[in-house]
Amino acid sequence: MSPSASKTDHSAVEICETIGIHPEIISKVSTEMPDRNDLLDLADLFKLFGDSTRIRILWALSESEMCVCDLCSLLEMKQPAVSHQLKNLKQGRIVKTRRDGKVIYYSLDDAHIRMLLNMGMEHIREA
Amino acid sequence: MSPSASKTDHSAVEICETIGIHPEIISKVSTEMPDRNDLLDLADLFKLFGDSTRIRILWALSESEMCVCDLCSLLEMKQPAVSHQLKNLKQGRIVKTRRDGKVIYYSLDDAHIRMLLNMGMEHIREA
DNA sequence: TTATTATATGTACATATAAACATATGATAA
DNA sequence: TTATCATATGTTTATATGTACATATAATAA
């Protein structure tokens, strides 16, 4: 693949403030960008991963489904704090629930979530 | 740290506020949780993905390396705003840079980043 | 040197948000 | 019914953070 980086088309190279240095790259990338709404949703998804409490919850749930009580005990956090985060995670379709009497069990929504966790951890742990 | 309850020891099932409903699950998951610092780092990584400006930058860079000017033009944003976010992304080892004279080209740090973007988008786009 | 251009940075402000606290809801058993 | 337990939900407060603005730095050319 030759990305036609320097095609010596200096007539197209304008100043930075208006249209950028490489208009051909800009227009090519522009056509390949997802819809703005998809990118917003994607940012919202990752935002839910971007908090240490929620990450700990998610990692715990990647090991086993758990009820709110168990998560409170594991994370040594107050129940309302855990419930608030679980609500956020559920609204973002990152976790799902199953009810058994008074107890509500939380688990990861699908396989993507576990893969995201693992891939992120891989990145963290490499040099 | 020494819960001898391992089988169906219902005498170990206490009320929620103190030790949780399922102590055997808690202790098992507890031993499999990564170090607290790793989870903090992981949350910080995802936090960087959790903003629509940065997500747009990252997606653009997944298509092609780009200079700051080009990103400003593509995203229709002011240069200081873009530079601030690029600084965050670089500190988080999500992007890397290459200098050519006055121009600094940004690109994704490694393959993990692109995979995270793609997997997140897959999750967004499924029912 | 000075001028120009590309990028970086310091600061201020406005918004977003996580946790603490109190309280409400829903399910079950007596 | 009432009592109890597991979970959810308001509300407040303190902190985090994204952007705008002004300015600084770095590389190149004249």
Image: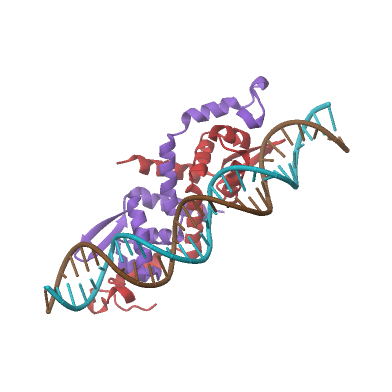
Chain colours: A purple, B red, C brown, D cyan
Residue in the foreground of this view, choosing between A3 and A99: A99
Look at the image and tell me whether residue B30 can be seen. yes
Q: Quadrant of the C terminus of chain A?
A: bottom right
In x, y percent, where is residue B24?
30, 71
Give the left or right position of residue A116, taking residue C8 as reference: left
Which residue lies at the image location 52% right of the left edge and 41% below the top edge? B58
Residue A93 percent across, percent down from the top left: 33, 50
Quarter of the rendering containing residue A55 = bottom left
What x and y, as percent, mark residue D18?
Answer: 53, 47
Of B91 and A82, nearer the camera is A82
Q: Is residue D22 left or right of residue A82?
A: right
In percent of width and height, residue B69 lies at 62, 34
Q: Residue at x 59, y 48 (%)?
A: B90
Question: What residue is drawn where x is 37% and y is 52%?
Answer: A114
Is residue A3 in view?
no
Residue B17 lies, with reference to residue B73, above or below; the image says below
